[in-house]
Image (spheres, rainbow, N blue to C red):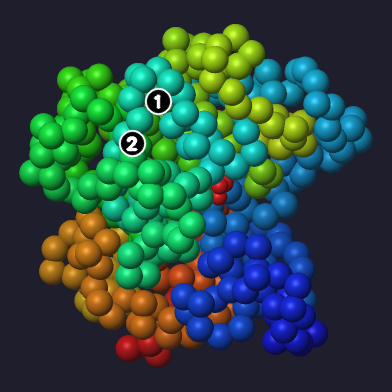
Amino acid sequence: MDHAELFRRSLAVTPGGVHSPVRAFHGVGGTPIFFRAGHGARLVDVDGREYIDFCQSFGPLILGHRDPDVSRAAHAALDDGWSFGACEPYSLALAEWIAGRVPWAERIRFVSSGTEAVMSAIRVARAATGRSKILKFTGCYHGHSDAMLVLAGSGLAGRVAASSAGIPDGTIADTIAAPLDDDEALEQVFDTAGAEIAAAVIEPLPANYGLLPQRAEWLQRLAARCREAGALVVFDEVITGFRVGLQGMSGALGIRPDLVCYGKVMGGGFPVAAYAGRADLLALMAPDGPVYQAGTLSANPVGMRAGLAALQKMERTGGWAELERRASGFVDGLRARLGAGVEIVRRGSIFWIRLAADAPVRRPRAIPERQAEWYSAFFHAALARGVYLPPSSYEVCFLSLAHDAPTLEAAADALAEAGRQAG
Ligand SMILES: *Cc1c(COP(=O)(O)O)cnc(C)c1O
């Protein structure tokens, strides 16, 4: 089949030919590949050509494509009916599983996307504090709700202002965007506006503008200033939750957020997300409290059962430790083969391949200027050798438990060659 022809037809019926911007390959150039299937670590395109996949649907597939346990759970759910719009035991099982393992998830509400999760968490924070301003950090991505599209990452990364059109001035005025990794800016924001801030929202490991690991002390200082100011700490763990470990970055950092947002891994690859946190805050939600939030397909049983199966399998098999072992071996080996000009930043099974820089890169501004140009060449050289990377230099790569030793060896060979070709 002709990928270009499929894309031409897509352009005639869909804006930009895609249902989510990064899929259009604008970040790397060329025509998007059309995939018809996936299995394990691999994607299969419409011609039957296979690729080792390091995108993994942008993170959800921590067990790889079509994991047999997740598949069984999803099929069982289909056999029982796929939407009730009523109480069912499946979301209860997933909520209990999470609440039993993540102490700061005292109450949990399921939604269908990370965007909804963060949007709802912000609403709770505003209701709880009676304040309207939200502090976010430039380069962090929190989904596409109005308030969060000011100086964001992901598909906006690399654009000049990195903000969306169509956001009302009032919303922009209520969003304070501060730089990551900046001690002075942090103090200044709280000194001048602390009393107006409902919440600080942050990816505790920013992973939507490349991977920008933050200093733990800086994150601790942010949490401390929030407490002093009476502002809530909202950790957006949509990408890191159940990915960097059972308790996510909150657990790794030892910072207890007031509210936490999940998505991606939690749904086993289905449209599932959640916001969770302090019982007194979640008590503000309808039907018991004054804050409204609802969803026709919320806690969809297919996603609930698939998500629980995925999380249970990760726990049962020691999945996070195994991923750490595989990812560190793979990345260390590949780093050596790619040479000094290229660096791989890694946390658990998340990694970002970028041009080397003089100092740790903790803000978008510090990303080497030639990154996008170099990555385009690297991406296409990898693609030609059967390795599919995320189609943007600012998106991170993911390893899954389906990436076994022979797969990783083949991938390392292909990526080392791609590195030589990209120069
Ligand atoms: C992916 C992501 C979101 C948005 O989730 P969607 O399900 O795409 O709406 C929000 N925050 C972070 C940190 C993410 O990685």
For mark 2, what is the residue?
Answer: 134
Q: Are marks 1 and 2 in contact (CB under 8 Å)?
A: yes
306 vs 79, left or right, is left
Compared with 141, 117 (above or below) is above
- Percent of width and height locating residue 195: 21, 25
Lower position in the chain sequence, tag 1 or tag 2: 1
245 vs 69, left or right, is left
Q: Residue at x 55, y 12 (%)?
A: 289
* Quadrant holding the N terminus: bottom right
Q: Nearer the viewer, residue 109 or 418?
A: 109
Choose top left, top right, bottom left or bottom right for residue 281. Answer: top left
Q: Residue at x 68, y 44 (%)?
A: 270
Q: Amino acid at mark 1?
A: Arg
- Percent of width and height locating residue 218: 17, 39
Choose top left, top right, bottom left or bottom right for residue 161. Answer: bottom left
For mark 1, what is the residue?
Answer: 126
Query: Badge 1, how many Cα within 10 Å: few under 14, some, many 20+?
Result: many
* Quadrant holding the C terminus: bottom left
SS of the residue under disc 2: strand
Task: Answer whether residue 237 is visible to the viewer in this image.
Answer: yes
Furthest-left residue in view? 184
Q: Nearer the viewer, residue 209 or 78?
A: 209
- Percent of width and height locating residue 8: 72, 84
